[in-house]
Amino acid sequence: MTEIDINKLILAPTSGDPLVAMRRAELAGWTREAAIASARADDLELTPAHFAVIELLQKIYIEKGRAPHARYLATLLYDTFAAEGGSRYLYQLFPAGPVAQGSRLAGTPAPHDTKDLSFGSTY
């Protein structure tokens, strides 16, 4: 199965890798203001530290496409922000999960296994 959406590909600029251009075009409608509003709905105030994570998630998505699984993105994030505290730091920034909440605020698709309901609930 391929990730190419021919309709998005037609609208994307034609120079370079067409998949990268398509994913960049997908994120063209994303705005910081929309992310801030969405974060406020989660009782979260975005700071420059949050935007560093969001921008990294967008960069990863544009360059590599949808992550094959949540662990892949989590490992990239933890490694990148290891000096700041890794996992603990990221969960302080994004209490609902750096991959799930971060991807949603970044406007990128979260990996399919970000939310696995098969493990039940705490309610």
Image (cartoon, rainbow, N blue to C red):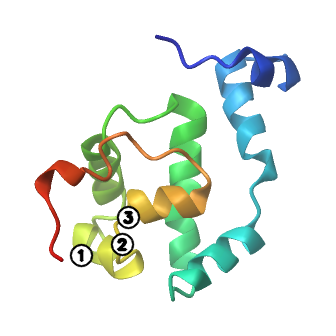
- Residue at 25% across, 45% down: 71
Q: Amino acid at mark 3?
A: Pro
SS for dot 2: loop
Mark 1 is surrounded, within 10 Å at the Cα level, by few (under 14), some (14 to 19) or many (20 or more) other residues, namely some
Asked where in the image residue 16 lies, by quadrant, the reply is top right
The amino acid at mark 2 is Ala
**Farthest-out residue, front:** 123
Counting from the top left corner in percent of width and height, residue 7 is at 79, 20
Compare marks 1 and 3 and give the one earlier in the sequence: 1
Which residue does the numbered mark 3 point to in the structure image? 98
Q: Quadrant of residue 83?
A: bottom left
Q: How many marks?
A: 3
Secondary element under disc 3, as helix, strand or loop, is loop
In the figure, 65 relative to 76: above or below? Answer: above
Q: Position of residue 96 (x, y in %)?
A: 36, 72
* Residue 18 showing in the rendered view: yes
The residue under label 1 is: 88
Q: Residue furthest top?
A: 1
Residue at 29 percent across and 43 percent down: it is 113
Amino acid type indicated by mark 1: Arg
Q: Is residue 8 above or below residue 24?
A: above
Q: Position of residue 19 (x, y in %)?
A: 65, 21
Quick one: label 1 or label 2, which is nearer the N terminus? 1
User: What residue did someone put label 2 on?
Assistant: 96
Q: Which is nearer the eye, 68 or 58?
A: 68
Q: Nearer the viewer, residue 24 or 5?
A: 5
State how far apart marks 1 and 2 are (Cα): 12 Å
